[in-house]
Image (cartoon, helix red, strand yellow):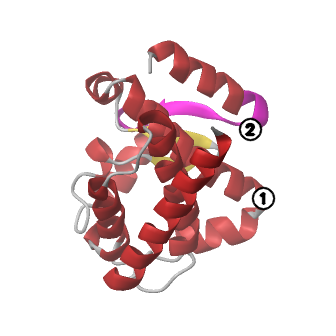
Amino acid sequence: MTAADVADLEARLAAELPRFAVRYKDESPLQRVIARLVRPFNRTYLTQYTTVMFGRVYLPSRAWCDRQGPETVYRILRHEAVHLRDARRWPGLFHVSYLVLLPAGLTLRAYWEWRAYAETLRVEAELTGDISDGLLRHVERCFTGPDYLFMWPFPRWVRRRLHRLRARLLAEMADQC
């Protein structure tokens, strides 16, 4: 995976999604305000999290992207593209359920994130030929932990569903070979 692969993905997303652009949180006054508002429960919003807003993907910073490397940026853009497509397909519902309603407890945000994390697993399978237990544990923590304010607080349910998704994606990949 190279910077050229990331640039190609960005060009394809820009052709598909007219408002698409990559922006950086540390360069955005709005993102810095949001970081102050969410600081009581998320101290790393500005430095570790990617956000989709107004058709744009906000990555933490250019320096962060350089440290992460093109493969990580590629993976993130594929994940966030799912959110951008969902926002385009269900504009009112997506924005109200994702941005206005807090992600705490049982909200529709878990549905949107499930769709995007399914893409994250798909990318992992495409790039490595497998989906690691470590990635499944990471996704489980995202759903059941404080990062998204416990948006789906049922770890066993999430774990079982992730294992089924991994099996399906790997089987689909094997069928394509």
Q: Amino acid at mark 1?
A: Arg
Q: Is residue 54 left or right of residue 88?
A: left
Residue under the image location 57 percent in, 72 percent down: 111
Quadrant placement of the C terminus:
top right
Q: Nearer the viewer, residue 16 or 162?
A: 162
- The image quadrant of residue 138 is bottom left
Q: Position of residue 168 (x, y in %)?
A: 56, 62
Q: Which mark is residue 129?
A: none
For mark 2, give the secondary structure. loop
- Above or below residue 39? Residue 56 is above
Residue under the image location 68 percent in, 32 percent down: 13
- Above or below residue 177? Residue 148 is below
Q: CA distance from mark 1 to mark 2?
A: 11 Å
Q: Which residue is mark 1?
A: 89
Q: Which residues are magenta?
A: 14-28
Q: Which residue is mark 2?
A: 17
Quadrant placement of the N terminus:
top left
Q: Is residue 92 left or right of residue 26?
A: right
- 24 magenta-colored: yes
Q: Is residue 152 left or right of residue 96?
A: left
- Above or below residue 140? Residue 105 is below
Tag 2 or tag 1, which sits nearer the N-term?
Answer: 2
Circle 2 residues within 10 Å: few <14, some 14–19, many ≥20:
some
Q: Position of residue 36 (x, y in %)?
A: 29, 56
Residue under the image location 35 percent in, 27 percent down: 65
Q: Is residue 32 left or right of residue 120?
A: left
Q: Position of residue 94 (x, y in %)?
A: 66, 66
**In the rendered image, is residue 113 in sight?**
no
Q: Amino acid at mark 2?
A: Leu
- 65 magenta-colored: no
